[in-house]
Amino acid sequence: MKGDNKKQQYRVNEQIRVPEVRIVGDGIESTVMPTREALRLAEDKDVDLVEISPNAQPPVCRLIDYSKFLYQQKKKAKELKAKQVKVEVKEIRFGPQTGEADYAFKLKHAQEFLTDGNKVKAYVFFKGRSIVFKEQGEVLLLRFANDLEELAKVESMPSLEGKKMFLTLAPKKAGAPKKSQQRRDNEAAEAQAKAQREAEKEMAGPNPNSPFAGLAEKLAEKESES
């Protein structure tokens, strides 16, 4: 720690005034010992005694060069910051009477934003007298949220602020995508239609034009003749 004029963030060496500490370090077995003995050991190894967990009982100290320790801490903080994903808020604007093609185009963009981990702030802008269509704008935003149900959760429901009605969506955590209500309804309808077709087929009996029609009866007749 000699020549280190940086502001200290940790208690080091003689600044540690507790009666005993637990020491850790490279090639050192974790053990509890009197602080004076730990200071002597640090001096013998030409390193510093750095208090890294002051609230532990007893406090934990590391045998390491203090400048090296600060460098390691700074490096860890930098790596942690790099791993953190910066969440951006992407805005998508609608009109109260947005057409289907424009809606689909903006829905696709919202899906991309959410997949990238960004939030989506969708809003309907009411220009002039179009404010009379505010209920239509609310329906549009609720439809938008429903169509993105697999990727997003609603963070704030549609709310009118001046001439804009806002809806905020946040991306869901990675995992198995949840089916939307519309998709569940479609699958249920398809399953019901399939079951109905199967039932009608059974009630109608075998197809008389099929090459296999009457095959079972013919086999039974041959067996009886033999």
Image (spheres, rainbow, N blue to C red):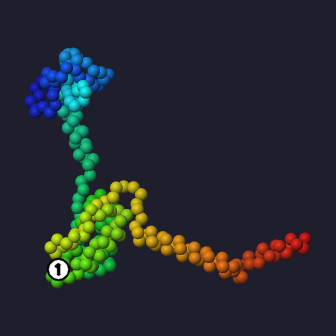
Q: State whether residue 56 is above or below residue 138.
A: above
Counting from the top left corner in percent of width and height, residue 44 is at 21, 16
Q: Is residue 46 visible?
A: no
Specify whether 46 is left or right of 145.
left
* Residue at screen point 21% across, 36% down: 73
Q: Residue furthest left?
A: 5
Residue linked to disc 1: 127
Q: Quadrant of residue 89?
A: bottom left
Counting from the top left corner in percent of width and height, residue 191 is at 53, 71
SS at mark 1 in the image: loop
Image quadrant holding the C terminus, namely bottom right
Neighbour class for label 1 at 10 Å: few (<14), some, many (≥20)?
Answer: few
Q: State whether residue 15 is above or below residue 154.
A: above
Counting from the top left corner in percent of width and height, residue 119 is at 26, 61
Q: Quadrant of residue 15?
A: top left
Q: Nearer the viewer, residue 23 or 154?
A: 154
Three-letter code, disc 1: Lys
Q: Quadrant of residue 105?
A: bottom left
